[in-house]
Amino acid sequence: MKKRLSSILRSMVLGGLIATGVARVLILFSASPVPDPASGRTEPSLFAPAISSNWDYITPAQTWLLIMLTGGTLICVVAWPIAAWMERRADAGSLRPASGRHIFGRQDR
């Protein structure tokens, strides 16, 4: 049985969301391995670094990875309902009678 395009795009959206989340977590885990000098341990700032004009905790390669994953996921999010709509239209077109429109109750007159 052939998979529909909308089903493939749905799977790609879910996979993209999971992959983007995993990439973000891995980037945050590697953000600042240096312990805090005051307490001597790694602080929870690894999990929620302060977002400011200083993006030193993320490398350009990591930035491009996140951009590509997020961009691909967003493209699939937009394409998924369009593909589903087109498939539904194609399915509805095959169910219509070939003779054109008929008024209800006036067939074969």
Image (tube, helix red, strand yellow):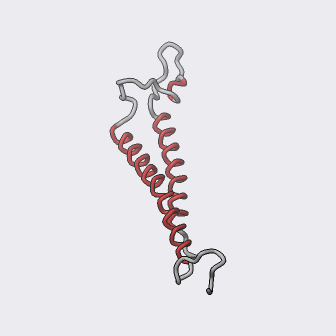
**Residue 85 at what x, y percent from top left?**
51, 62
Front-lying residue, 5 or 47: 5
Rendering coords of residue 104 (x, y %): 64, 74
Above or below, comparing residue 16 to residue 90 in the picture: above
Q: Quadrant of the C terminus?
A: bottom right
Closer to the camera, 68 or 29?
68
Residue located at (53% from left, 68% from top): 4
In the image, farthest residue toward the top? 38
Q: How many marks?
A: 0
- Looking at the image, which residue is at 36% across and 29% down? 55
Q: Is residue 21 above or below residue 2?
A: above
Q: Percent position (x, y) of residue 8?
A: 52, 63
Q: Residue furthest front?
A: 109
Q: Nearer the viewer, residue 83 or 27?
A: 83
Q: Quadrant of residue 66?
A: top left
Quadrant, the N terminus = bottom right
Q: Residue at x 46, y 55 (%)?
A: 76
The answer to which quarter of the image holds residue 105 is bottom right
Residue with the most extreme right position: 105
- Residue appearing at x 52%, y 48% in the figure: 17
Question: 60 above or below 37?
Answer: below
As drawn, the residue found furthest toward the bottom would be 108
Q: Quadrant of residue 92?
A: bottom right
